[in-house]
Image (tube, rainbow, N blue to C red):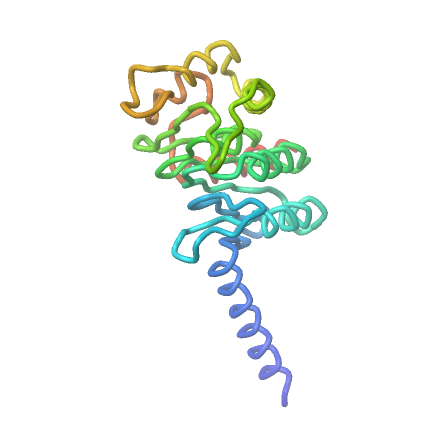
Amino acid sequence: MDGNQKEENQKEKNKKEENENIREFGEIEVGDDEHRISLLTIIGEIEGHECLPSATKTTKYEHVLPKLAEIEENKDVDGLLLLLNTVGGDVESGLAIAEMIASIEKPTVSLVLGGSHSIGVPLAVSTDYSFIVPSGTMVIHPVRMNGTVIGAQPTYDYFKQMQTRILGFIAKHSKAKEERLEKLMMNTGMLTKDLGTILVGEEAVKEGLIDEVGGIHEAFRKLHEIIGKK
């Protein structure tokens, strides 16, 4: 086998690995000769310690956390672009991913496409800069729990503590105030069967959750800009 054939085989192998990463984990590396950017998607429901039904689109935190660690340590990666279209999911797992993203030293930018609801809100604000498309939505609501719940004071105290953790993280990583976020969370006038608030596009920017309305072009441009400054 000559050198050219070996090179072609390696390219084909790399392409297959790249396609497998997109299909299985929603991740790929893109960029030009100057900057190398890692693209990571958070879609569907964020899966926690229990497996969701196979028909449900999920993001598994056990896949995302190692990838984020690899991005931080990989010298060939200059920045992270996070694409979000999630209905939320497991609170602990979502916060774990958000904290991991917030602690990455490399430049990070998020883009909300479709929606970033519930625990997706902390994920959207965990980056250095955030975008939302004009039709994108963000839903802020109280913590929910499925299954049997013990109707005792410690249970409600636990719920309150969890909500405080979420609101504290959002307020720390965005321009929104914790008091305002709690008011939006407890709004009774918008969702007919639940508490909370739906923010669409520019509304999320006005509330201080998201930095700017924009799409993939603006997100890439901003990330290259931050990388260039660093």
The residue drawn where x is 46% and y is 50% is 58
Q: Quadrant of residue 17?
A: bottom right
> Is residue 80 shown above or below 211?
below
Comparing 42 with 105, the one in front is 42
Residue 135 image position (x, y, % from top left): 30, 32
> Is residue 42 shown above or below 115?
below
Residue 23 image position (x, y, % from top left): 47, 61
Query: How many numbered marks have been drawn onto this rendered protein structure?
Result: 0
Q: Residue pushed farthest bottom?
A: 1
Residue 211 image position (x, y, % from top left): 46, 23
213 left or right of 181?
left
Of the 4 image quadrants, the one containing the N terminus is bottom right
Comparing 70 with 149, the one in front is 149
Q: Quadrant of residue 170?
A: top right
The residue drawn where x is 51% and y is 65% is 20
Q: Quadrant of residue 157?
A: top right
Residue 136 image position (x, y, % from top left): 34, 33
Q: Residue pushed farthest front?
A: 151
114 left or right of 151?
left
The residue drawn where x is 49% and y is 53% is 26
